[in-house]
Amino acid sequence: MKRTLTLATMLLAATTLFAADEPIVRGAAISKDAPAVSLATVIEKPAEYSKSPVVVEGVIASSCDKKGCWMQLAPEEGKPGIRVTFKDYGFFIPLDAKGMKARAEGVTVVETHTKAQADHLEEEGAKLTRNADGSAVETSFVANGVVLSR
């Protein structure tokens, strides 16, 4: 019995190590037809990427620490990024995704958050620029699907 338990533990540990190298896929598969655009370009000219999906890549600077329902994606560590949400609140990322590389397909969206919505987002770790009334206007990226890797 002790030997079986030891073997089972070793097998679980080995499986976990191999699984750590596997990409994590959430949402829809990333299309082969969507053009790849640098994340820095999307951040600089968001209006140009609001109609047709594009593929961006970056590093996860932070993410929702309650559910994994958004991530802050930056072109590289230490650079400004954009908050990425997931289409129709349809999928989530792991809570320990900070520092992972991400590839996402989607479009940019400009949203006005009420004070209550902005408060909620900031409680989850989002960084917003507030208006005098506490509301916030935010340009974000709405992803249909993402692929995460270490």
Image (cartoon, rainbow, N blue to C red):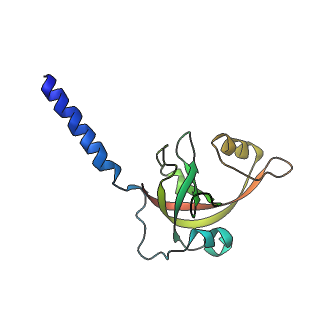
Residue 49 at x, y = what percent?
Answer: 61, 73
Q: Residue at x 41, y 74 (%)?
A: 32
Residue 72 at x, y = what percent?
Answer: 59, 54
Depth check, front residue: 26 or 7: 7
Q: Is residue 3 left or right of residue 117?
A: left
Observer able to see residue 50: no
Q: Residue at x 30, y 46 (%)?
A: 17
Q: Residue at the front extreme?
A: 78
Observer able to see residue 132: yes
Q: Quadrant of residue 12?
A: top left
Q: Residue at x 21, y 39 (%)?
A: 11
Q: Is residue 40 left or right of residue 27?
A: right
Name above or below for residue 72 compared with residue 43: above
Name above or below for residue 37 compared with residue 91: below
Residue 128 at x, y = what percent?
Answer: 72, 51
Q: Residue at the top extreme?
A: 1
